Every structure is written in C-alpha cells, then in structure tokens.
Amino acid sequence: MIAKCVPMNNIKRSSFTGLVQYLVSGQGKAVRVGQVLVSNCYSDDPQWAALEVEATQTKNMRAESDKTYHLILSFPTGENPPPEVLKAIEERICKGLGYCEHQRVSVIHDDTDNLHVHLAINKIHPGRHTIYEPYRDHKKLAELCTGLEAEYGLERDNHTPKRTAGRSKAADIETAAGIESLIGWIQRECLSEIRSATSWSELHKSLWGHGLEIRERGNGLVIINPDGIGVKGSSVSRECSKKALEARLGKFEISAEAQVKEGTERRYAPKPMPTRVDTTELYSEYQAERNGKTDSRALEWKNAKEKKHRLIEDAKRASRLKRAAIKLATKGGAAKRLLYGLVSKSLKGEIAKINQEYMAERQAVFAKYRRYSWNDWLQEKARQGNANALDTLRARQVRANLKGDTLSSDKAPANHSGAIPGVRVDSVTKKGTIIYHFAGATIRDDGKLLKVSKGAGQEALEAALRMAVERFGKNLTVNGTLGFKEQVVRTAAAARLKIEFDDPDLEKRRLFLMKIGEDLPGSAAHKYIQERNQKRLIIADIAEHRPYTPMDAGDVIFRGLRQVEGVGLALLQKGEQILVLPVDHSTATRLQRLHLGDAVSVTAERTIQVQDRSRGR
C-alpha cells in the first residue's frame, strides 16, 4: 500500500467542492466510483458535506496555505481488501496524521489496475477553526503503511524513497503521460558522460553534443535545451549538483565559446517511452490528430467570438434605434429618462445573455476537441478496438497479473480482445487492462487472464466464458474460490458451451452436469418437479418441489431417491418444500442406506454429507 499526498500547485484554484465533484463523478464509466464515506459532517451526502466543509473553511481567514488535504491510498495490482478493511485503514491513517476529528470525504475508485482510495480532508478544525498541517507527513505515512500492511496481511511495499523529488516527479510524468521527460532522457543519454568529464570545458562539449547547455541560476546549476526547457542539475542526479561538480571540477566556468551544435541527432525531443513495440506510426497519427484538433478548435472559437461580437453589435444598433425613436416621440425629461433607463437595462440583459451563450458554446467546443495526452489517446483508441494501441499500452512495463477469480489458458492468447457482441467496453487502463461491464458485473482482461468480479451472476459468467473461448480457445483454466469454480462449471453446462477444463475434477463435474441436464428445461429433474407440482394442484398433501440451489446449503431431511430417465434424484426437505438434487451413481448407492427422515447436510458445491461422514458424491 502506498499513501501519497497530492499538493495543489495553485492555491487560488483549490476547491473542496470541485475536488469532491471530481471524486464522485462516474465520468461516463459504469466502473469507477465504489464506496463513498463522509466523516464528521452533519450530512452523509458528499455534495452537501462539501458545502459544509467550505463553510467551515471560511471561518479561518488568516490561513494563506491550501486548506484542503488530498491523500491517495493505492494498493498493488490484484489486491482488493474488503470495504470494512478499507474503512479501518482510512480511519487509522487519518488518526495517525492528526485528522481524526476533521471533516473528510473518502471515495474508492476501481477504474484502474490498482484499487485506490481518495481522501479529501478539511485542514480547518470544525470546532477550533485552526488550520493543521502534518509535519513531515511522508515519513508518518510510511510508518503507518508499514504497520497496516503487517496488521492486515497486505502485500509489502517500499516506503523509503530512493530518488530526489525532481526525479520522482519526472518518473510520475513519464508514467502518467507515457512521454519521455527531459530529466529521464538526460539520465539515460548523458549522465555517464557527465560523470566521466574531467573539466568544465569537457563537460560543456559533452552537453553541446546532446543539444544542451549548463548554466548558473541562483545558487545552483540548470541544464537547458534549445527550447528553453530547463531542469536542475541536482534533479538529474546528486552528482550533478553545483556542490558536487565544483568539488570534482573546481569553480564553475562559463565557456566563452558555449554553443549548441546545430543539427545534432542526439537532441531531446518529446517522444513515447521506449518499449518492445514500434510506436512511430501511432505517434505520428496522434500528433496529426492533436494538431488537427487544435486548428479546428481555434477556428470554431474564432467563429463563436465573431458571432458574439456580431450579436452584440446588432443589440447595440437596435438599442440606438430605440433611443432615437424615444428622442423623437417623447417630450418631457422625466418620461424620456425613464424610457432611456428601460432601454439601457434591456441592452445590458441582452449582452449578458449573449456572453453567457458564448461561454457555453466555447465550453462545448473545448469538450468536442479535447486534447488527449499520449497515454489517454492510446486508452481511447484501445477502447474503440485499436489492437496496436492496446499492444502499446501493454508493452510499456512489466505488469503484475490479475488475481482472484480468473479464467485463462496455457495456450498463447489470440491477437484480439476477445470481446463478444453485447458486452460493452467500459474503459481501458493505462496498463492496457480492458474493463467490461455486463449484467451488473465487471470483467477485466489484461491479455493473459480474465478476472470476474465477486457476485457475478450466471449471465455475466456465461459472457465471461464465451469471451474466454474467443480469447484463449476451448481449453480453459479456472482459478479462484471453490464457489466460483462450481458456478463456472454449472454455467458452462447450462449454456452447453463447447469447452474443456484442464482441471480433471472440474471437467468430470461439467460432463456429469451435461449428462443429467440439471436445472434445464426438459431435464430429468425439471420433468420430475413439474410432474409433482401438477399433482399438488389435485392432492394437497404433496409438498412443493423445486430445484436445489447453493443458497439452500445446510442441514436438510432426507426424503428418498427417485430414478427418472436413468438419472438419480435425491429428495431433500427444507421447511415445507422438497428440494430435488441430481446425484451420480455412487452417491445414490450411499444414500440408499439411509432411512426416510434422516438428517443430512449439503454444501454449496452440492456435496451431500451424512452425519459424521464427509465423503461426497
């Protein structure tokens, strides 16, 4: 688990309401916002709580720093603690930071590869109205995370930073945008030559060859490219700080002939991070589309602005005509002033309306030609079905496989997403995991595994199985809980899917269910249940019959065996109903030794246990 505070660079733009609106917004996705918790507020509604927090923040007018503390708790890929654990972790973190009594809104997001929790905390105490800022919060957060990982058995993470703040920020930019940063490029291309330089002139020449210059700025050194983009030397490496370089090369020297070599090929230019996939064509397409959107947006903005000016001029012209008419037709100063005032008020209202319409049109144009970062563009193209974009996302870094209830295969996956008609792609993560939403359940495809969310029904499981067949072939591997495996086998049998499970026990169970056709119309169990319930309409003593379901697991009373079309049916009484459960030959033979009325128990996996004996069918 990693805990990270997200500072607001521009304090004037800080808004607790705006932050909460972002956190609770679904952004057009069915899978994004999970549990929302509001603490220490009168209202449990996050929007009303946000207004309450802002009212509290106005009680402190002396604080000049940001009054909102935005914290993110992120968990490793595949780790999904239950809601009660997440709530306990949130409370412990806030108590450890000193925000136990402060107002806060916490929101779980599940639209990325890593489950994460956003905490929007009011730094202003609701009672004292004083601002509180944790001292060295990164160290306190590291200690809290370490203790919570051990307490709740979570996967251990590294909480000791090994990079400078500048290098960490550059790495975050590269991860989020997918574009190589100047700091990262210098580290990969120039750092070894900087370390090997024996004089300032040699260092200058080495940097010139890469299209860079090193200059003094303030009390340190900066490395600048021809576009004017500069980075601190200490951000590149501690060995590139002014103190370290002067200790090795002597006092800083400005070269009289400092000049960047023109036309050098080893020059920094923003481009995708290097991976095993050639992104040349895709990046060219991205740049062309971005430039086209920029030009189109500028043109539509220009047209909207011209339209606004034209409408305002028309309104002013109409107002002048009205004033002229009033001047000619009206005598008397008081009446004329009154009419002039009405015309002026009408003009101001019309101009305000025109400006409001212009701003709405401008916002619509901005949304229409939204500029995507490289990573966001790849995600959008992958969501639309672009296989190259999806492959590029998945090639960016070594990714941890999905964990939990999954479907996969030992065979190499096919070169397509494996989607089936009617299953909507909800979103694509930055690591190339496709998230589908179907029948109230979530299916995640990372290219190697299909993960099905907990509580998925038969319809969603059938969709996942059909997708797995398209994605991996007919031979499937099922991993997860026993209950999930039983659900998958029963769904495969009920849907008559042409698949095979590599687990012999699961495959044997599937074939058995296919043979007896359990719970299917026309099956032996279905025919027997239908026959008994029809007789019940005539003979009142006959109990209601229905199929056995996993929800019926527990103690029942044995009421006999029946043979219908060669299939054994166990009759089990629960309450006033008779449950009909198909059994195989060995189980039927074992049950024949029982007496009517004997107590037995059945598991969710349909294993019948007789008193102290645990052998199942």
Image (cartoon, helix red, strand yellow):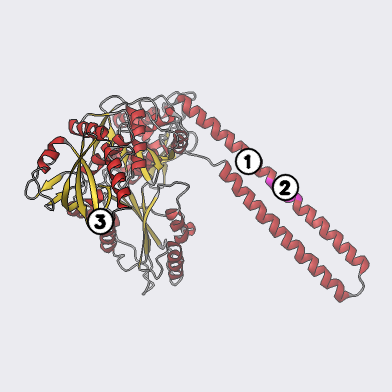
558 and 13: which is toward the camera: 558
- The stretch of residues the image draws in magenta is 304-310
Give me the C-alpha separation between circle 2 and circle 3.
83 Å
**Left or right placement of residue 549 versus residue 560 in this view:** right
Q: Residue furthest left?
A: 612
**Tag 2–tag 1 contact (CB < 8 Å):** no
Numbered badge on residue 403: none
- Local SS, label 1: helix
**Image coordinates for residue 305, horizontal then vertical, percent:** 69, 47
Q: In x, y percent, where is residue 238? A: 29, 41
Pointer 3 residue: 541
Q: Which mark, by number, is residue 298?
A: 1
Question: Label 2 sits on what residue type?
Answer: Lys
Question: Is residue 514 magenta-colored?
Answer: no
Disc 2 is placed on an element classified as helix
Kindly report which numbered mark, 2 or 1, lies closer to the viewer in this rendering: 2
Give 556 or 28, whichever is nearer the viewer.
Answer: 556
Within the image, what quadrant is residue 449 found in?
top left
Q: Amino acid at mark 3?
A: Asp
Horizontal and vertical percent position of residue 304:
68, 46
Identify residue for label 2.
307
Q: How far apart are the two marked residues, 3 and 1, measured between alpha carbons?
A: 81 Å
Can you give x and y, in whole percent of width and height, for residue 55 in the image? 46, 70
User: Residue flagged by tag 1: what amino acid is it?
Assistant: Ala
Mark nearer the N terminus (2 vs 3): 2
Residue shown at 37%/67% (left/top)? 131
Give the left or right position of residue 371, taking residue 529 as reference: right
